[in-house]
C-alpha cells in the first residue's frame, strides 16, 4: 500500500521547480542553450562548496549520509540552478568565476552564524561588476499568462514549504500595487500594458525563488514584510524613474546588510531546514478547496482577468496628414546608437503619398536643440540593410569519380531579397499646447511641442490643419503624463524644391536620457494589421536586446533545397512568418550581430555586400569613433571615445495585440557573432559509374530528404506548397529521377505519415497497458 504521507526536505521542491523552468526555457522558449555554462555553474558550485565546507569543518566530508549531500550539496545546488536560469556569460572562465563568488560569499560574509547575502544574487552582481563579461536578460522569459500562473503555483508551493510566503507576497503586492498606481492611475495606460509588466517571468522568479531565501531574509514575520516592501519600493523607483532593469537583484544585495539589524530589533528563532510532511489526500482536499466560497471568488476574479481584451493602442511615431488622414505606416527602418545615457536615433520610413501632405509626430524625452537634429543620406540604410540581411550561401559538390578540386562559391541573396524588411498660434494657449522650439532643418519644418492633455494636443493639431488618425489621442495621454515632448515634422516645400528627387531624407536626432526605447504604440494608431520594423542598433559593449519582450535568434546555418534559390525572398518571408507565429508573436527576431569595429578585419562570414566603413558608422550616429580636435572642452570625458562598435540587427513584426508596450532595449556584454544564413548545395555533375559515385547518389537522396524536412520545419510549408522552377536542369540531368526533389518529397511525406501512425499506436498501447495495470491494482486492493 502506497503511504499517504512521507517526510521530504522542502529543498526538493525548489530544485524541481528550478529544473522545470530551465527546461521550459531551453525546450519551449528555444533559448540558445549554453550547456557549457550550465555544467560549469552546477559542477563549479558543488566542487567549491564541498571544498569550502570540508575546510570549515577541518575534515573530508562524505558524499552520502547526514553529513554528506544534505549538508554540503543541497543548498548550493539551488544557487547553481539560479545562475543557470539568470546569468549569461561570454566565456567559460567567467561562469567559473561566478560560481566561486557565489560559494565564497557564504563563508566570508557572515554574521550570527548566517551568511548575509543571497549567494546566487551576490555571485551574479559581483560577476557583472568585476568582469564586464556577464549580463542578465530580463526579456528572456517573455510575458505569458501561462508562465505567470505556473510560477505563481510552483512558487507558492516552494515558499510555503519553507514558511516564507509572507515575504514573497509582501514584495509582489507592493511592487504590483505601485506599478498599478503609476501605469493605470497616473499615466493612464490600458490594462494590457500593466498585465504585460507584472507577468514577466524574471519578476516572478525573483519573487518566489530568490527573495524568499530563508537563510538570508529576516527571521520575524513583521521584519520580513518591512524588508520585502522596502526592496519592492526601491526597485519600483529605479525601474519607473531611472529606467533601470534587473533592479530587484541589485536592491536585494544592497538591502542584505539590513537583515542583522532587523533581527536584533524583531527577535525570533532562526530558520533551520527540516523535512516537511507531504500528504496525498489529493481528491478530498481538492474538493474541499474548490467548494470554499473564497476560492470561488478568486477563481471568478482570475477568469475575469483572463477575459480582459489585450487591445493595445509603429514606428516611433505616427503620420498625421494635412489632407484626408489616410496615410499608412507599414514598414520602417530605424538606426539607434546608444551608450550610457546618450542616444542617436535615425528614422527612415516607406512613406507613400504627396510630399506636401507629409507630417510625422514622434515622442521624445527632452526638448531637442537645433544642433541635435540633422538629415542624413538615405544610402546609409541601404548599405546597412544589404550588409546585414539574411543571406543564401551556395556550395558545389565534387564528383567523387573525378579528380577535380573541391569548388565552393558563396553568393549574396538575389536582388529580390534585398530589403527583406526591407504653425499657427491660434488656440494654442487654450489647448494647453506649448511650442518649446521651432527649426528648419534640411527640407523639414520642425516643432518641439509639449502638452498638458491629449485632447488639447489633438485639438491643436486639427486646428492647424493636421488630421490625426482615429484613436491616436487615446495613446497620446500616457506620453503627455510621462512628460514626453513631441517632435512634429512636416516638409518645407520651398526647401524641398532645392533638392533633387521626390523622396525624403532620413532624420537623425540625438539626446541625453536614460530612456533607451522606441515608442511604437503611437505608430499603431494609423497602421492596419502587422507592421515590420528593422532596427539597426550600435553599442560599444555588445549586442542590443529587447528588455520587455523576448529576443529570439532565427534558425541559421540550415541546409535547404536547391530550388529555394529561385525565390529566396519568398522563402525567407515564409520562414520569418512561421517562426514569428511559432514563438508567440510577442518577440523580436535577431537577424545579425557582429563586431564591426574598424580594428576588426573579420566582419561577416560570408560578406554579401560592402562592409560599413568608419565614415559610414559615423554617419549612422556612432559618435564615439571620432572627435573634434579643434574643441578641447571634452578632454575630461576621454572614456566617451572608443574604437569598439558592435552592430545588432533586430526584425520586429508587431501589432496591437502582441505588443502592448513600447520597445525597451538594453545593451548587453554578449559579443557572440550571429548571422541568419541558409545553405544550398549543388549536386555534382558527370558520370557516377564508380563505387564512390553510387554511394554519393545514395547520400544525396538522404540529404535531400533532410532538406525537405528542414524546409517544412523552417517555413511550415512542404514541397507541394512551392512553385518549383527547375532552372538548374543542366545539373539535374545527371541525377537519377528517383533522387529528384519531387520523388524524394513524396517518399518523405509517406515516411512522416507512417511515423505519426506509429507514434499514436505506441501511445494507445501504453494507455491500454496503464489502464490494465490500474485495474489489477484495484482488484488486489478490493481483496
Image: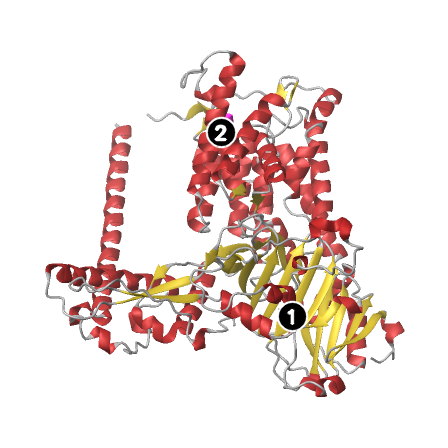
**Label 2: element kind:** helix
Q: Would you identify the image quadrant in which residue 722 lies? A: bottom left
For marks 2 and 1, give the CA distance. 47 Å
**Mainly helix, strand or loop, the magenta region?**
helix
User: If you read the primary sequence from the N terminus, does the residue marked by circle 2 or circle 1 appear first?
Assistant: 2
Q: Would you identify the image quadrant in which residue 376 lies? A: bottom right
- Rendered view: 643 above or below 727: above
Q: Would you identify the image quadrant in which residue 563 lies? A: bottom left
Task: Point out residue 230 in the picture as x, y percentages from the top left corner.
Answer: 73, 36
Residue 644 or residue 780, whichever sits in front = 644
**Residue corresponding to mark 1:** 347
Q: Tell me if mark 1 has few (under 14), some (14-19) or many (20+) residues whose alpha carbon lies within 10 angstroms of its own.
A: many
- Rendered view: 722 above or below 582: below
* Residue under the point 71% across and 88% down: 497
- Rendered view: 73 above or below 525: above
**Label 1: element kind:** strand
Q: Quadrant of the N terminus?
A: top left
Q: Which residues are magenta?
A: 75-79
The answer to whether residue 662 of the structure is visible from this angle is no
Task: Point out residue 626 in the picture as x, y percentages from the top left corner.
Answer: 68, 59
**Residue corresponding to mark 2:** 45
Task: Point out residue 441 in the picture as x, y percentages from the top left corner.
Answer: 76, 76
Amino acid at each position: 500500500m502506497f503511504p499517504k504521507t512521507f517526510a521530504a526536505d522542502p529543498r526538493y521542491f525548489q530544485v524541481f521547480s528550478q529544473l522545470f523552468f530551465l527546461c521550459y526555457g531551453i525546450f519551449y522558449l528555444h533559448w540558445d542553450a549554453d550547456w557549457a555554462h550550465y555544467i560549469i555553474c552546477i559542477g563549479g558550485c558543488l566542487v567549491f562548496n564541498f571544498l569550502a565546507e570540508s575546510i570549515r569543518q577541518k575534515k573530508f566530508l562524505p558524499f552520502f549520509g547526514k553529513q554528506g549531500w544534505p549538508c554540503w550539496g543541497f543548498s548550493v545546488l539551488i544557487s547553481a540552478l539560479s545562475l543557470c536560469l539568470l546569468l549569461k556569460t561570454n566565456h567559460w572562465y567567467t561562469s567559473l568565476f561566478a560560481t566561486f563568488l557565489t560559494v565564497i560569499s557564504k563563508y566570508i560574509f557572515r554574521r550570527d552564524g548566517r551568511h548575509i547575502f543571497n549567494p546566487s544574487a551576490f555571485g551574479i552582481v559581483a560577476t557583472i561588476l568585476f568582469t564586464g563579461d556577464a549580463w542578465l536578460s530580463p526579456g528572456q522569459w517573455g510575458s505569458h499568462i501561462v508562465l505567470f500562473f505556473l510560477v505563481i503555483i510552483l512558487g507558492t508551493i516552494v515558499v510555503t514549504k519553507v514558511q516564507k510566503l509572507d515575504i514573497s507576497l509582501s514584495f509582489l503586492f507592493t511592487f504590483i500595487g505601485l506599478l498599478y498606481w503609476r501605469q493605470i492611475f497616473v499615466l493612464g495606460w490600458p490594462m494590457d500594458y500593466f498585465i504585460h509588466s507584472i507577468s514577466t517571468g524574471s519578476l516572478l522568479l525573483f519573487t518566489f525563488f530568490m527573495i524568499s531565501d530563508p537563510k538570508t531574509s529576516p527571521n520575524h514575520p513583521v521584519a520580513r514584510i518591512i524588508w520585502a516592501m522596502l526592496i519592492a519600493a526601491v526597485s519600483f523607483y529605479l525601474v519607473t524613474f531611472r529606467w533601470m532593469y534587473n533592479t530587484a537583484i541589485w536592491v536585494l544585495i544592497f538591502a542584505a546588510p539590513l537583515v542583522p539589524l532587523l533581527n536584533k530589533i524583531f527577535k525570533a528563532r532562526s530558520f533551520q531546514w527540516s523535512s516537511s510532511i507531504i500528504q496525498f489526500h489529493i481528491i478530498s482536499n481538492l474538493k474541499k478547496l474548490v467548494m470554499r466560497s473564497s476560492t470561488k471568488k478568486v477563481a471568478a476574479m482570475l477568469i475575469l482577468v483572463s477575459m480582459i481584451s489585450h487591445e493595445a493602442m509603429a514606428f516611433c511615431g505616427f503620420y498625421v496628414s494635412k489632407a484626408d488622414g489616410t496615410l499608412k505606416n507599414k514598414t520602417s527602418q530605424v538606426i539607434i546608437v546608444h551608450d550610457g545615457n546618450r542616444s542617436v536615433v535615425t528614422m527612415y520610413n516607406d512613406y507613400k503619398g504627396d510630399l506636401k501632405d507629409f507630417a510625422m509626430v514622434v515622442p521624445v524625452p527632452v526638448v531637442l536643440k537645433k544642433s541635435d537634429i540633422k538629415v542624413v543620406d538615405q544610402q546609409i540604410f541601404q548599405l546597412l540593410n544589404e550588409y546585414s540581411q539574411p543571406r543564401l550561401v551556395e556550395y558545389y559538390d565534387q564528383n567523387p569519380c573525378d579528380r577535380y578540386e573541391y569548388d565552393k562559391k558563396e553568393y549574396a541573396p538575389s536582388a529580390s531579397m534585398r530589403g527583406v524588411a526591407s504653425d499657427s498660434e491660434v488656440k494654442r494657449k487654450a489647448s494647453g499646447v506649448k511650442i518649446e522650439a521651432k527649426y528648419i532643418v534640411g527640407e523639414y519644418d520642425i516643432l518641439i511641442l509639449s502638452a498638458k492633455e491629449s485632447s488639447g494636443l489633438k485639438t491643436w493639431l486639427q486646428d492647424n490643419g493636421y488630421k490625426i488618425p482615429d484613436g491616436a489621442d487615446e495613446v497620446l495621454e500616457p506620453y503627455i503624463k510621462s512628460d514626453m515632448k513631441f517632435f512634429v515634422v512636416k516638409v518645407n516645400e520651398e526647401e524641398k524644391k532645392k533638392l533633387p528627387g521626390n523622396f525624403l531624407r532620413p532624420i537623425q536626432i540625438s539626446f541625453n536620457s536614460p530612456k533607451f526605447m522606441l515608442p511604437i504604440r503611437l505608430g499603431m494608431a494609423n497602421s492596419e494589421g502587422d507592421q515590420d520594423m528593422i532596427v539597426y542598433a550600435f553599442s560599444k559593449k555588445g549586442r542590443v536586446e529587447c528588455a520587455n519582450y523576448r529576443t529570439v535568434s532565427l534558425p541559421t546555418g540550415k541546409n535547404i533545397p536547391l530550388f529555394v534559390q529561385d525565390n529566396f525572398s519568398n522563402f525567407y518571408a515564409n520562414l520569418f512568418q512561421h517562426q514569428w507565429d511559432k514563438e508567440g508573436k510577442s518577440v523580436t527576431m535577431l537577424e545579425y550581430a557582429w563586431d564591426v569595429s574598424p580594428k576588426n578585419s573579420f566582419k561577416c562570414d560570408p560578406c554579401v555586400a560592402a562592409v560599413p566603413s568608419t565614415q559610414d558608422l559615423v554617419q549612422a550616429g556612432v559618435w564615439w569613433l571620432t572627435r573634434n580636435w579643434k574643441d578641447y572642452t571634452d578632454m575630461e570625458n576621454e572614456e566617451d571615445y572608443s574604437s569598439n562598435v558592435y552592430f545588432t540587427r533586430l526584425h520586429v513584426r508587431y501589432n496591437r495585440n502582441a505588443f502592448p508596450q513600447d520597445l525597451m532595449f538594453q545593451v548587453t556584454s554578449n559579443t557572440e557573432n550571429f548571422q541568419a544564413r541558409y545553405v544550398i548545395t549543388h549536386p555534382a555533375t558527370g558520370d557516377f559509374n564508380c563505387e564512390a559515385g553510387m554511394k554519393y547518389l545514395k547520400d544525396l537522396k538522404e540529404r535531400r530528404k533532410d532538406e525537405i524536412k528542414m524546409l517544412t520545419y523552417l517555413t511550415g510549408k512542404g514541397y507541394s506548397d512551392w512553385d518549383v522552377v527547375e532552372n538548374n536542369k543542366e545539373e539535374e540531368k545527371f541525377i537519377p529521377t528517383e533522387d529528384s526533389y519531387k520523388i524524394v518529397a513524396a517518399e518523405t511525406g509517406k515516411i512522416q505519415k507512417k511515423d505519426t501512425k506509429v507514434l499514436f499506436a505506441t501511445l494507445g498501447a501504453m494507455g491500454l497497458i496503464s489502464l490494465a495495470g490500474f485495474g489489477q491494482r484495484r482488484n488486489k486492493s478490493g481483496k
